[in-house]
Amino acid sequence: MDGDHLATTAEVVAVATSVVGPYSSARILGCRIAMFTLLTPRGLHGAMPRDYWHVLEPTGRHIQRDSLGGYYIDMRHKARPYKGPTQDGFPLRNQNGEGLQLLPVTVTQMALGHYDCFLEDGDLERQRTIARCADWLIEAHGPCPGKQDGWSYGFDHGRLGIKAPFISAMGQGQGISLLVRAHKLIGDDRYLDAARVALQPFFHSVEDGGVIAHLPGGGVTLEEYPSRPYSHILNGFIFALWGVHDFAIHTGDDRAAELAERAVDTLADMMPRYDVGYWSRYGLFPHPRPNVASPFYHELHIAQLRGLKEIYPRDVFTEFADRWERQFASWTNFTRAVYGKVRFKRWVKQTKRQLVAAGIEVDEATEIWTGQTASLPA
């Protein structure tokens, strides 16, 4: 399946040229159409130069509904050579300004990119890379102080009240998605055993060191960041859900399948909360002002909902994907969203500076971050 829902300007020009020739008036018209496409907010966003970490991630090309196919988001760009600092061949990232780190999701996404490439070219070198990544995940999974065993993340997330180390539903889910694919491809039972161990935090609440939140009424969410209050980060919820689904579909595990269905039902019911009327929200942490998604994450949300609809055919996912695509075509909405994001980030930076000046730990100021206390103590 091709998840691209908007042709690039270069593709539009190439098609026009191949049909009518390089110098015709029709080609000029085609170029004008291409420029019009580029001048939509989504077209402009798609044409911007990007680094390794922010390349657009469309819906996956090889999704299978009833079996373990390609990944649901196209990560093939993560399989390209990385020109920045590395550790053992894996890209390092300066997360939240806390220095270069090797994040488990970096290893996982690199391998998922190679997996989808392997489905297309059968290059055995990619298989060896996938095995190396899976081996790294096995070694890295282990105790996390105060949490269930998992892949630990070593950075703080102050405005959510999270201090390192912590485990993440998104991290666990993407790791599982890679391990079960490595097992399918290579047949090494170590990968399946590791995926089963990595699934266990999904059966423990955030309060118990796990990664799920039990909601009033019986709903369950999968938390990228184990915050209190819950943050319900949309992209992380969906990435985590795919991991639980992949384990269930690959092994026939009833407990995982039941959890995935409950999570899908909960997400479907929550979808209206992720819409602010003109754009999508990044998450639902109760900040005093909405944390609207950046254009990158708004685009990712659309691609994720289309991928999710492929395996869980709920009309609500198509409804919001279509709605957010329409919103992305509006300069008014785009400008409002970017302005809102800038204001939110400015508020976060200003609040952090005020907390530091007042001698208050950034990750221990929940009442400030949730707006329960309007101002800092004198």
Image (spheres, rainbow, N blue to C red):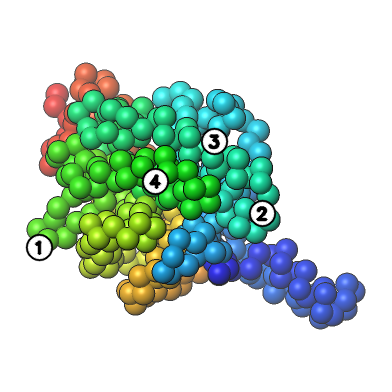
Q: Give the x, y percent position of residue 88.
A: 57, 26
Q: Which one is earlier in the sequence, the residue at label 1 or at label 3?
A: 3
Q: Say which quarter of the image contains residue 81.
A: top right
Q: Which one is earlier in the sequence, the residue at label 4 or at label 2?
A: 2
Q: Considering depth in this image, is 308 or 299 the residue closer to the camera?
A: 308
Q: Which one is earlier in the sequence, the residue at label 1 or at label 4?
A: 4
Q: Which one is earlier in the sequence, the residue at label 2 or at label 1?
A: 2
Q: Residues within 10 Å of mark 4 (few under 14, many from 20)?
A: many
Q: Considering depth in this image, is 330 or 201 the residue closer to the camera?
A: 201
Amino acid carrying label 4: it is Leu
Name the residue tied to disc 4.
192
Kindly tell me whether residue 231 is visible in this rendering: no
Q: Give the x, y percent position of residue 173.
A: 36, 48
Q: Residue at x 31, y 64 (%)?
A: 275
Q: Residues within 10 Å of mark 1 (few under 14, many from 20)?
A: few
Q: Residue at x 24, y 29 (%)?
A: 363
Q: What secondary structure is marked by label 4?
A: helix
Q: Are marks 4 and 2 in contact (CB under 8 Å)?
A: no
Q: How many marks?
A: 4
Query: In the picture shown, does residue 348 fall above or below 240?
Result: above
Amino acid carrying label 3: it is Arg
Separation of residues labelled 1 and 3 (CA atoms): 43 Å
Name the residue tied to disc 3.
132
Q: Are marks 1 and 3 in contact (CB under 8 Å)?
A: no
Q: Residue at x 13, y 56 (%)?
A: 215
Q: Quadrant of the N terminus?
A: bottom right
Q: Which mark is residue 217?
A: 1
In the displayed structure image, the side of residue 311 where residue 22 appears, left or right: right
Separation of residues labelled 2 and 1 (CA atoms): 47 Å
Name the residue tied to disc 2.
122
Amino acid carrying label 2: it is Gly
